[in-house]
Image (cartoon, rainbow, N blue to C red):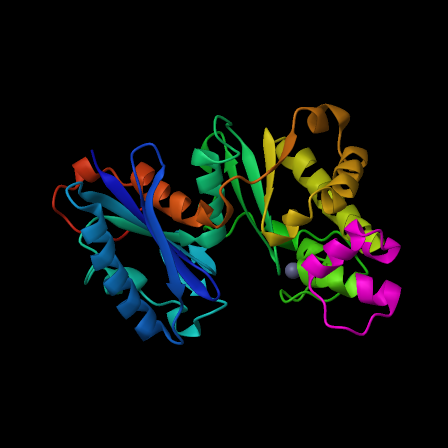
Amino acid sequence: MSVYAGFDLGGTQLKYGLINEDCQIIYDSRTDTPGNAKELFQLMDTLWQKLKSKAKKEPIAAAGFGIPGIHSTKKDRILQSPNYQEIDNLDINSILNKFITVPFKINNDANMAAYGEFKAGAGRGSDSIVLLTVGTGIGGGIVLNKTLWQGECGFAAEVGHIIVNHSGELCNCGNRGCLETEVSGPKIVRNYIKLSQETKKLTAKDVALLAREGDENAKKAFEQAGYFLGIGLGILINVLNPDKIILGGGVMKSGSLLLTPAVKEAAKRSFTASFKCCQILKAELGNKAGIIGSAAWAKDTLSHSAFPGKKIGRDDN
Ligand SMILES: [Zn+2]
């Protein structure tokens, strides 16, 4: 039996761990991310040595790395990173090859989280799922017919940038009214401030608490965001006809405050037949989805028996 290593690089934390053949976590931990790319790779080297010692007698057969940014499957590198500009267009594989002694793969972090939910979370047993992670932004991934849908060059599944409000706020991507500008945690706070004229500094969690205490403006702030989330879900349902749409991320802890208006709007906006055969569910793996997904991705895409003892760092697709 072998185990598989997964690394999930976030904005502030690097999560890492090991899974077994059944995609169950057997070890996981996290640490703060350093300030520059050189220190990041040094840290990955240290954590890799740690994972090898944690694996003990069971060999690590492959490793996966979920990294934020625009990942090109053709060049197998990150073209644009939101956190470490030094890795833009960098041949990360050559750097990792210096210390990762098993076959490994890099991919986009949101794709890896979706793959994790597909393999071991709320998407288990389904053929086609969409994961949306609603937090400070919206990330996502798509699995169709049991295959991670990466698109022609690897840039698919930017679900956070589906335009749901033509007159909406300006998004980081340069467009207006993207799903992520209309539905993220910060937007829910802005909705509330606009409605209530509140001057205190608040988080989406605070607004959720206020809504549960009966604050009508707080409820409305979630309803406004839920309406736009529903438009986005309706588009996904009509285009992809998925078995499941899985919603994760910190903002989904608000539960029905966001979900009820979203499902109501999605039902209105999509074909009834397609809506009825799509389950809208909460994600199950929380912040471990990325570790499980990247390790499972390496497990499923790198046949270690095909490369005995060799360092394979590149996907030649
Ligand atoms: Zn956008």
Residue ranking furthest to the left = 309
Nearer-the-camera pick, 26 or 41: 26
Percent coordinates x, y for residue 164 in the rendering: 75, 51
Q: Is residue 279 left or right of residue 60?
A: right
Location of residue 209 by image quarter: bottom right
Percent coordinates x, y for residue 286 in the rendering: 51, 46
| Residue at 14%, 48% in the rendered image | 310
Percent coordinates x, y for residue 153 in the rendering: 45, 51
The quarter of the rendered structure image containing the N terminus is top left
**First to last magenta residue range:** 192-218
Vertical comparison of 140 with 14: above or below: above
Vertical comparison of 287 with 199: above or below: above
The quarter of the rendered structure image containing the C terminus is top left
Q: Is residue 49 left or right of residue 109?
A: left
Inspect the magenta stretch and tell me whether residue 202 lies in it. Answer: yes
Query: Is residue 315 visible in the rendered structure shown here?
Result: no
| Residue at 81%, 74% in the rendered image | 199
Magenta span dominant secondary structure? helix
Q: Is residue 262 left or right of residue 172?
A: right
Q: Is residue 296 left or right of residue 47?
A: right
